[in-house]
Image (cartoon, rainbow, N blue to C red):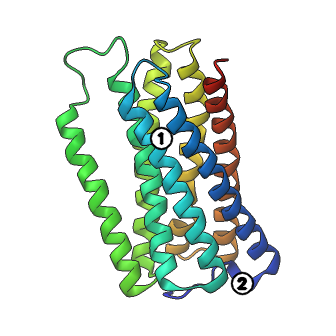
Amino acid sequence: MTAVLPLAANAPDAVVTRFIGFVLLAVSSVSFAVLARRNHRLNRFESRTAFWRYLVLTGVAGVAYGGFGVVWTVTNARLSLAFMQASLLVLIVVLSFAMREVYFDRADAPTEDRFSLETLRRVEVGFVVVILLEWLGVLLLGRSTVLRVVLGGGSLAFATYGVVFGESVQSRGTTQGTALDTLLRHLIPTLICVGLIGLGDLVGGLGVSPVIVGSVENVFVVMTATFLVTATIRLQQNVEGL
């Protein structure tokens, strides 16, 4: 199972859907990165420099994932597949890091927290190692069963990491009614959807029909692009001072 076609069962409609989904994701990511950068320069949200940098990187990673996805859909080249899957993991990780920054920069953050930042840094280094191993593995071996499971499991784990922090901030109510709270309401669904893109590879690695795998990936690629657009609109409103 090292050379699965870009879309299950050569279905033309599925290929078109995947292609459009990747294009939408790449385009929306460009706008997201630009507006995140503008928010950073305008010093929105009380000098949350690291938060804005992670959001800019989220947009850059989204462009890379969408762009390499388009190339892979058209060419089925192993090189583009390796960079596409690595970009997906980077996208999830940097957006999760943005959620972590919000959690530790909140107004009610205690001196001692149940989440040790030092321990979390070690976990995050592990995330980076997984990304590098996934990229190298796909580059050398193609879309093997083991690597598909690693991608799927890693996607879900990385996304869960970020969602836990985002939901913790919202549950505390410290950002309630603020522009940051509104932005988080768009970013958390985006993170969930992008994390679920890897679900297709996970179930594919476990022997599920390629038709189902392709459909799952298509749905979440399009949903990720959609939620990213809504988050981009929120960023635009911040720039306009609404």
- Relative to 190, 101 lies left or right: left
- Asked which secondary structure carries label 1, the reply is helix
- Across and down, in percent, residue 56 comes to 48, 44
Using the image, determine if residue 159 lies above or below residue 130.
above
Q: Amino acid at mark 1?
A: Leu
- Asked which secondary structure carries label 2, the reply is helix
Residue drawn 44% across and 84% down?
Answer: 142
Q: Which residue is mark 1?
A: 55
Distance Cα–Cα, label 1 vs label 2: 36 Å
Residue drawn 49% across and 60% down?
Answer: 88
- Across and down, in percent, residue 39 comes to 52, 30
Q: Which residue is mark 2?
A: 9
Can residue 198 be seen here? The reply is no
Can residue 171 be seen here? The reply is yes
Using the image, determine if residue 74 lies above or below residue 69.
below
Label 2 crowding class (10 Å Cα cut-off): few <14, some 14-19, many 20+? some
- Across and down, in percent, residue 146 comes to 39, 76
Q: Amino acid at mark 2?
A: Ala
Tell us which disc is closer to us: 1 or 2: 1
